Amino acid sequence: MKALVLDSKETFTVKEIEKPDFSEEQVLVRVSYVGVCGSDLARYFEGKVHNYPIVLGHEFSGVVERVGGQVRAVKEGDRVAIAPLVPCSECENCERGKPALCEHYSFVGSRQQGAMAEYVAVDEKNVLVLPDEVSIEEAALIEPLTVAIHGIERIQFNAGAEVVVFGAGTIGVMTLLALKARGAGNVTVVDINDEKLKMAREVGADFTINSKRVNLTDYFSNHSRPEVVIETAGVSQTQVQSIEIVEKLGKVVYVGTATREVVFPPKVFERILRGEIEITGSWMSYSVPFPGFEWKAALQYIKDGVIDVKPLINGVYRLEDKETPFLKMRDPENYSIKFLYEIC
């Protein structure tokens, strides 16, 4: 089968590799679309992989080509989306119903071969059959939407709550969409890219702020502070600002991964204590029964038209385009939200 193989750091090759075998409990999926995730950029540009060669890609959809003998809920020809986490189902966290915290997990496109290829073999439990109302292209965006849903479900907030989202990338915009679907009130999106902020407004942001030009401390001294802040940018400055701007008794969810040291000055840390601010992290997007309510909700939101992910797709490529979408995403002037490879 044809695959886009990462042979070494910043080296993609389109080549023929063996079609994957599949067990009695698995299905063989012919991949249709696969998204490029921010985590894939680190694997390509920074060499953050578990081994070479590796086929990347964990946000994907496709059509079931064949099924194992013990597969019951999925049949050949089904259009599907795939949950890429492969929990061990045996460790303490798995037994507690927390598969995202599995100690011995595998992951499609990271710890095992991914979907930037014609075929992938996955366990039946990882497969979500698509309703007729959800296109196979839209289905490639279900995984990042589940990350956003998981993040906002880490806390409780009332309908109409004022929320600030840091970051207008894929997860930030998905978080905006999920918040609106969940009944949030005014949602303000903060970023430093005007084009991304424009996109955020187009899909439902009530307010946007370019923090290169607006001092957030001054802004929220003159405007109501948010009850909820969700940080998706993974930038040390915004991780601190999340505490600075949230109201007393407010809630902060950290979704973005830290890439540099995060230092809270004493005055900022004091806000956590004196304001009794609730802080939590969010990791991946899974619950029980696996893959979890996040996946059912994402599928339902798209099916019902409550969330429209189509405007977030800014480019579709072939495997032969190799690193082209990776380079575009790495460009500081890039304002695109999601690039896909169309495989079959």
Image (tube, rainbow, N blue to C red):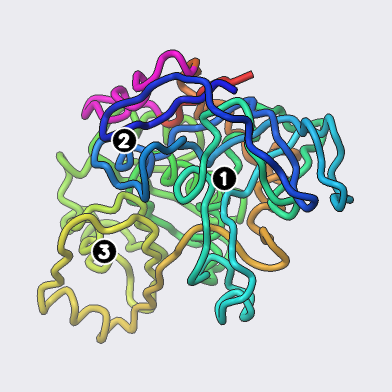
Q: Residue at horizontal 38%, vertical 52%?
A: 165
Residue 11 on the magenta span: no
Q: Secondary structure at mark 3?
A: helix
Q: Nearer the viewer, mark 1 or mark 2?
A: 2
> Which portion, as a residue range, is magenta?
319-336
Residue 44 appears in the figure: yes
Q: Amino acid at mark 1?
A: Glu
User: Residue 245 shows which numbered tag?
Assistant: 3
Disc 2 packing (10 Å; few <14; some 14–19; many ≥20): many
> Nearest the camera: 260 or 167?
260
Q: Amino acid at mark 3?
A: Ile
User: Residue 44 shows which numbered tag?
Assistant: 2
Q: Quadrant of the N terminus?
A: top right
Say whether disc 3 or disc 1 marks the residue closer to the N-terminus.
1
Question: In the image, 216: left or right of 81?
Answer: left
Q: Position of residue 241 (x, y in %)?
A: 22, 61
Residue 327 on the magenta span: yes
